[in-house]
Amino acid sequence: MMNPALLVLADGRFPAGGHAHSGGAEAAVKAGRIHDTATLAAFCTGRLYTAGLTAAALAAAAADGRIDPLDLDGAADARMPSPALRAASRRLGRQMVRAARTVWPDPALERLAADRPRGAHQPVVLGITAAAAGLTPADAASAAAYESVSGPVTACVRLLGLDPFQATAVLARLGTQLAEVSARAAEAAAEAAATGDLDFLPAASAPLLDLYAEQHAAWAVRLFAS
């Protein structure tokens, strides 16, 4: 039976700041790479198997609890070449800590807030929050993978005026891939936790997302924070 906490954590209304971020979609729209539901689906698929896989594994490892969260935070930093993406991830992490400490008070969240007052990386915070909510590492991976594509889908409804029904259909059709990526991420996190070797965590590369993030951060006017 699904833990209701997973629904709360994955809900776009959870006040963790994700609604203000497009996951690179805004820059991709401006570059002409996203212009309809077909190109949105392609973008989300690519993001899921790169940034999504990496984030899901970090979240699962943090939820497992056997690896020091600060080590995971460093691993997340190493997997984000773009300074703009690192800054956005830490802002999101800081906001998620604020929300999670109220919803699911837990000593691990308090320690992380004290150790990283300017914010730990969002996937790490997500994993610790999942554990505080009584969720499993697999649940944390699922929530992170889903978040990696739900943000761009929601953003493109606003950016392109897409039919929200068709945009949601894009998200729904990713169900099989979401399950696959979540399982791969949870398996990699378990290996990392069992061995203490963080190299088991994926470091999938998405160079265009890095480039878009740097370009987007320099815009004088933008709808989304990232």
Image (cartoon, helix red, strand yellow):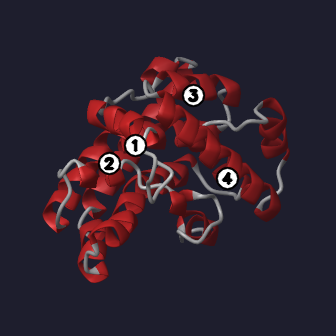
Residue 124 appears anywhere in the view:
no
Answer with mark 3 or mark 1, whichever residue precedes in sequence. Answer: 3
Question: Gap between marks 4 and 2, in whole Å?
Answer: 24 Å
**Circle 1: residue type:** His
Give coordinates of residue 216: x percent, y percent. Answer: 40, 43
| Label 1 sits on residue | 216
Task: State left or right for residue 135 relative to residue 115.
Answer: left
* Figure quadrant of residue 36: bottom left
Earlier sequence position, callout 4 versus callout 1: 4
Pointers 2 and 1 in contact (C-beta within 8 Å): yes
Q: CA distance from mark 3 to mark 2?
A: 36 Å
Q: Which residue type does callout 2 highlight?
A: Ala
Residue at which label 3 appears: 193
Q: Report which residue position mark 4 lands on.
A: 96
Q: Is residue 135 visible?
A: yes
User: From the viewer's perspective, is the residue at label 3 or at label 1 nearer?
Assistant: 1
The image quadrant that residue 101 belongs to is: bottom right
Mark 2: give few (<14), some (14-19) or many (20+) Cα within 10 Å: many
Q: Whole-Å distance between the Cαs marked 3 and 1?
A: 35 Å
Give the numbered dot on residue 82. none
The three-letter amino acid code for the residue at tag 3 is Ala
Q: Residues within 10 Å of mark 1 (few under 14, many from 20)?
A: many
Q: Which mark is residue 27?
A: 2
Element under disc 1: helix
Q: Is residue 77 left or right of residue 178?
A: right
Question: Foreground residue, 39 or 32?
Answer: 32
Of callouts 4 and 2, the N-terminal one: 2
Disc 4 is placed on an element classified as: helix
